[in-house]
Image (tube, rainbow, N blue to C red):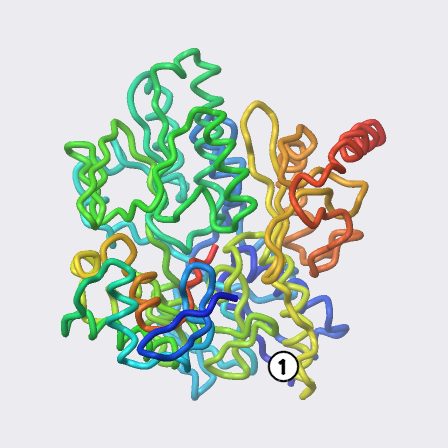
Amino acid sequence: MGHRIVVLGGGTGGTLVANRLWRSYAHSEQVEITVVDSNDRHVYQPALLFVPFGLASLDEIVRPRSKQLHSGINYEMSAVDHVDLPANRVHLANGREIDYDVLVVATGAVLQPEETPGMTGPGWMQKVFTFYSPEGAGALEGALATFSSGHIVVNPIDMPIKCPVAPLEFCFLADWYFKERGVRDQVQISYVTPLDGAFTMPTSSRMLGNMLAEKNIELVSEFNTGEVDGKEGRLISYDGRELPFDLAVVIPLHAGADYVGRSPGLGDQLNFVPSDEHTLQSKARPNVFVIGDAANVPTSKAGSVTHFEGEVLAANVRAFLAGEELAASFDGHSNCFIEAGFSKALLIDFNYDTEPLPGRFPAKIGVPLLKESRLNHLGKLMFQWFYWHVLLPGRDIPGLGSGMPHAGKLEAPGDGTDEQNESDEKEVHSNAG
Amino acid sequence: MPVKSYAGAQVDVEEDGFFVHPEQWSQDMAPEIARESGVPELTERHWEVVSFMRKEYLASGDSPSVRLLGKASGVPVKELYQLFPKGPAKLAAKIAGIPKPRSCI
């Protein structure tokens, strides 16, 4: 009998790692792969940012989960009740039990709006919205369309969140959106964050902070929201500060999937799964691996991270099943386009040890890093095609491995080589055209 | 790397005052670090949090976040802000002689 690999979660990580593993075994009798998810709706999450502004529609960004998997992979549609780690067995909510040799946890992060007092009370989905769910993004589109004066606050309640730059991108796009509609001077936009600046890491925090200022978006830092009052329209911080709003766009607290909490020994207090940040093996059991947002590793909860992890995880699962050392090592590589509005975007690229730096990606001739450009906006738009056709099938992007590239990065911001870079961009652009 | 003197001993700290080597910390240093950070007196309730922080750090290798403190320390988040104004996780970590909590991105 072949190895039994069970993958919990048919999102980005579960899908790409199942497909990668399937292809890596030459004969189907060597391996039996089962992917479990509670529904058959695979949402292309990066596009949720665009839905409120009418730049994407929900029906364009949802596809069946089962169709993204190789036909040799089993797809089981059920919620998970719990995992019995000592027995190597998954108990499904539909009553079935599945035994495994290797378990891959890929159930991502869930939103917990009910954890913040008042958030889901009066005004929820009328005055208080989130674009982090398809329903929320759709409802927000309607609310923005009729909003032409007042104060909008955008507030990630606490870290970690999926795609930590998305709330900033929302601000930039809102600035563009209200300018296009000719009402920007009647709309006040505030970015409210528990962090002490626009972002976590120093160089990008400074640059993104400057962008907020240039676009006349107020930055309210070190604001830890303890309560949302949707009726009166105020955010109230734990230390008693109040921030009035006419429309609040909140990013609720995140946690790992509920079943993790029902599976003794698997997760931490927030239901994320502690795992080795390099091998992606869980700390719970050697035959349990973790990919994507479900893992408690110190990098972004983002699709690019999951993609880069996929290569490492598939290699290590194979090595584990063959009784070999886990040789593959993940470096924390993360890469994201930051939409800036007005058909421009920035790109940031970093890992566990290197913060986002300016320069070029992936090498000296490449797209600009930490700088607004049209090329990056096109990259962001093109990415959906890549997602369905390259990333989910678990293929490598030509010329780009899982490790973070160093070539093309400037060691320190603004060291005078910018002129050179500017001409590179033109060159690339004309080549591309 | 800066060096500070607490309770008569020299310790290595980061630029922002967090301990580089948690093993250099001892209980009698805590009141002094607290006073420097704007907490004039460490009550029993403060100590509950500080001890929890240290225990968690030594067990997991990570300094707990405010949210985790609220869930697991037995002190509700609202009270944490009263005890350690502005940033409970940061302040309590500093007083407990452990690294700054990594606000994961």
Q: Residue at x 46, y 38 (%)?
A: A168
Above or below, comparing residue A159 to residue A371 in the picture: below
Tag 1 secondary structure: strand
Q: Viewer-proximal residue, A399 or A44? A: A399
Q: Viewer-proximal residue, A103 or A235? A: A235
Q: Is residue B1 left or right of residue A219?
A: right
Q: Would residue A120 be visible to someone looking at this image?
A: no
Q: Residue at x 62, y 41 (%)?
A: A384
* Residue A259 percent across, percent down from the top left: 36, 69
* Three-letter residue code for mark 1: His
* Residue A276 percent across, percent down from the top left: 54, 74
Q: Which residue is mark 1?
A: A3
Q: Residue at x 57, y 67 (%)?
A: A74
* Position of the C terminus of chain A by quadrant: top right
* Residue A83 percent across, percent down from the top left: 40, 77
- Label 1 Cα neighbours within 10 Å, binned few <14 / some 14-19 / many ≥20: some
Q: Is residue A85 left or right of residue A269?
A: right
Q: Is residue A120 left or right of residue A407?
A: left
Q: Would residue B18 be visible to someone looking at this image?
A: yes
* Residue A282 percent across, percent down from the top left: 51, 76
* Position of the N terminus of chain A by quadrant: bottom right
Above or below, comparing residue A406 to residue A277 in the picture: above
